[in-house]
Every structure is written in C-alpha cells, then in structure tokens.
Amino acid sequence: MKRSWTLCFCLGLGLGPGLGLANFAAAPAPEQRFDRASIDKPFDPVWQAMVETLTELKLPIIKTEKEEGRIETDWVSYKGQKNKTGNCDCRRPGEFSEVDRKGRFKIIIKKVSDAACEIRIDAEFVQMLSGIGRPDRSEPCNSTGKLEGLIIQAVKDKTKLNPFDSPLCSPHS
C-alpha cells in the first residue's frame, strides 16, 4: 500500500509533468469563436447590414436566399498573406510552390425572435499549389477567424447606427 501511494505522489508532483501527464489535470482553454454571434435586432436590418458589409469588404455575393437567411460569396484571392497574421493558416507547401490562397463564405442569418437574430459564418480557405513536373493541386487551410470577426463586428456596428434608436432623432420629437 505504501509503494502505490509513493508512486502516485511521484507521478503527481515530480514525474507527471515530465511525462506530459500534467495536461490531464488542467482543463483546456476555451476556444474563442469568431464565426457565430447573436444580435438583438430584427432580421431585416441585420440582413441589410450583412449585405452592405460584404459589399464594402469586396466579397462578391454570388447567391442570396433571404427567406432562408443564406448568403454565399464567390472565391476571393488572399495571395501573399502569411500564416497566423492573415485570414487563413495553410500548411507549408513542401516540394510545391504556393500560387495563391483563396477563400469563400457561407453565411446563415437565423431569426430567433422578432427582435433578435443569430449569425453563423462558415469560411472555406484553400491553398493553390504548383510543382515542377507535378500536377497543380489545392489543399485546405484553416481560418484564423480574423475576417469572420471583422464581418460580425461590422454588422453589429451597422445595426447600432439606427437613427431612430436615438432620442434626439425620434420620429415623435
């Protein structure tokens, strides 16, 4: 009995962290999500703010289904952006050369009540690769969440700018 207690004590205090066992004790840090948001505004102003934001960011809209709350953008080039600091994080090309990085977005705006909506942004990024004597190919990349966060913040800001929300500009003054 004494040996098992000593072994547990040593693993917990001394050897455990060295063996990578310390991770079992600590809970993982919560992931910060930039692709979802709730907005306490009706559907129509949120929809309009999203369309305006995508247009201002030069993200070409190729499909809208307002009744279903769906917007899709076309592919946009992010050539020259770096991993971690850009909009996507792509693997190292290895024997290939990176020709381009592209991204597109699928956005869902869901009415949760007469005065509130939820936004979900699904981003898809790819790295276009080329190699000497090899066929060109594309590889998926991970979003850094920066552009999604920018889109959501812009929509929130636009929906806050309703002049009728201000008592100074009330239609009843």
Image: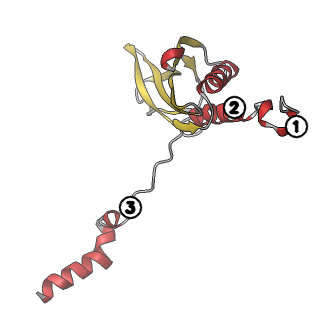
Foreground mark, 3 or 1, reads 1
The quadrant in which residue 135 appears is top left
Q: Is residue 17 visible?
A: yes
Can residue 73 be seen in the rendering of this structure?
no
Kindly report which numbered mark, 2 or 3, lies closer to the viewer in this rendering: 2
Q: Secondary structure at mark 1?
A: helix
Q: In which quadrant will I find the N terminus?
A: bottom left
| 10 left or right, relative to 121 | left
Residue that numbered label 1 is attached to:
168
| Residue occupied by mark 3 | 27
In this rendering, position of residue 172 left or right of residue 9: right
Please state, as top left, top right, bottom left or bottom right, where the C terminus lies in the image. top right
How far apart are labels 3 and 1 at the CA level?
49 Å
Look at label 3 and name its amino acid: Ala
Place of residue 55 in the rendered image (x, y in percent of width and height, measured from the top left): 67, 18
Q: Which of the marked residues, 3 or 1, is nearer the chain's N terminus?
A: 3
Taking the image as shown, residue 85 lies to the left or right of residue 130, namely right
The structure residue drawn at horizontal position 45% and vertical position 20%, both measured from the top left corner, is 129
At 70% from the left and 21% from the top, the residue drawn is 56
**Would you say 9 lies left or right of 131 here?**
left
**Spot occupied by residue 65 in the image (x, y as percentages of width and height):** 51, 13
Which residue lies at the image location 50% right of the left edge and 19% below the top edge?
A: 70
Quarter of image, res 9: bottom left
**In the image, residue 99 above or below residue 110:** above
Q: Residue at x 14, y 85 (%)?
A: 3
Between the residue at mark 2 and the residue at mark 3, the CA separation in whole angstroms equals 37 Å
Most distant residue in the bottom direction? 2
Question: Mark 1 or mark 2: which is in front?
Answer: 1
**Residue holding disc 2:** 159
Instruction: Give the camera-side residue of 34 and 127.
Output: 34
Instruction: Determine the CA span between mark 1 and mark 2.
Output: 17 Å
Say which element carries label 2: helix
